[in-house]
Amino acid sequence: MFSKEVYWQRRKMLRAMVGEGLILFAGNEESSMNYSANTYHFRQDSSFLYFFGINKPGFYGVCDVDNDRDTLYGDDFTIDDIIWMGEQPAVSDLAADVAVEISASVNELATLLKQAMQSGRKVHLLPPYRGDHVVKLAQLMDVDHKVVSELVSQELIEAVVKLRSHKDQFEISEIEKAVAVAGIMHTTAMKMAYPGNFERELAGAIEGIALSHGGPVSFPVILSMDGQTLHNHYHGNELSEGRMVVCDAGAETAMCYASDITRTFPVGGKFSSRQKDIYNIVLKANTETIKASIPGRSYREVHLMAARIIAGGLKELGLMKGDLDEAVAAGAHALFFPHGLGHMLGLDVHDMEGLGENHVGYNGSLKRSDQFGLAYLRLGRELEPGFVITNEPGCYFIPALIDQWKGENKHKQFINYDEVEKYREFGGVRIEDDVLITDTGSKVLGTPIPKTVEEVEETMKV
Ligand code: GLY
Ligand code: MN
């Protein structure tokens, strides 16, 4: 937990930004797998963590803007709980840890909310993303569940996004810890990527590394030789010479800050010359666009720069043709680079995505494109100091997409389909780093993780 003043200050700023009413943060409950006592790993709601810091199920935080005070609602643990869970702090002690002076039971929250609803007082909610939240909130307020969605507050979303978008030095150092663990995960996967091993052995080993460093993985491990499937969670293949492994994985710290790193490496430890060609195009897109990620520049512009570098590299290899600016403007590069360059990173791996992707990544002056490829760009807005973002260009050969576009003769003035056919079995390459926007430019967070062809091959030497 950060120092109590951090949470106090965050809530004070939030109350000032929202202006009136009650702000209600619902912490998460345990979530069952196959019967109620057998639960998934508990994950606290990130906004609740940001403002109230308590990483336990069953709590609610209320910021009373009109009366300038905050309350933590939760029920003290019973002796039965303590028998199964061990000694637990009192709710009042938990509240004191995050500089909340008042604590009360969940029943008292129900009374407060019912009164607020009856008197027409404004109650601000963030969008609930778990069904049990909707049911619980409707019960607490004694309203139909449809009313709950009407309480989702644009003012609150905007204020939370504004605060959480700018990471302070404590948050940055947490993310750096998460990147350090990811570094061990990725170098371990590289060293294990030899013919005869199974993808699942690599995936299991790196998930264990995250756990052994105190947190789970920050999202289910993406690891496959079929890296052309962008989020491939199937780990059943036996590794074979001539293929590459795309590994997209990160760790969460004990305080729930995430890393999100991707590396691509050749099974057996040596890139073929064709693999090197594609790899170096993606590497150039990664390194050049990190340099270009500076305050005041829109990430959409940086994304399009990555697209141009990839299209340029593919043109040199004979896979694309024609005018590069026209090709990128038309979206022809998206056959190979169909996703966005990156997203915000913080307490969530796609930070604040639960509040609405466009609230986080776009703003009044910049609307999300509906062009294939660019439409997947989660973060398009101007960069600001304190943002932590991912930079993750990729180049993929997706047989179903190639067939579809070729069948339609789509962008045939920019794509040399005969050459593309020769790469059908290639798979994909993605390279991803976590990047802080500074006052003057940008900085890759954490200790460097092998990334050039030489560094990867050196790491993989047995
Ligand atoms: N690391 C997975 C993603 O960014 O979507
Ligand atoms: Mn990512």
Image: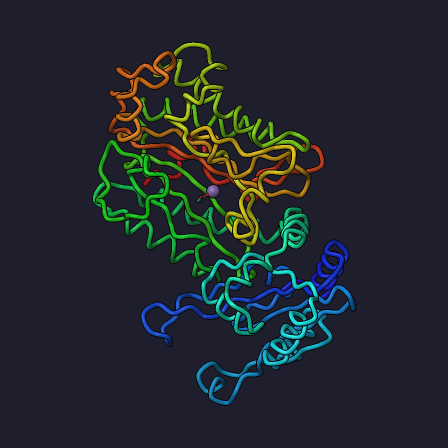
Residue at position x 71%, y 71% in the image: 100
Q: Position of residue 166 (x, y in %)?
A: 67, 47
Figure quadrant of the C terminus: top left
Residue at position x 48%, y 14% in the image: 326
Q: Quadrant of ligand 1?
A: top left
Say whether residue 425 is left or right of residue 366. Answer: left
Residue 300 seen by the camera: yes
Residue at position x 35%, y 67% in the image: 33
| Among the 4 quarters of the image, the one containing residue 25 | bottom right
| Among the 4 quarters of the image, the one containing residue 122 | bottom right
Q: Position of residue 120 (x, y in %)?
A: 69, 66
With respect to residue 5, does 93 lie above or below?
below
- Color encoding of the figure: rainbow
Residue 169 seen by the camera: no
With respect to residue 172, does 450 lie above or below?
above
How many badges with numbers are in the image?
A: 0
Q: Which residue of the protein is positioned furthest toward the bottom in this rendering? A: 79
| Among the 4 quarters of the image, the one containing residue 373 | top left
Say whether residue 292 is left or right of residue 129. Answer: right
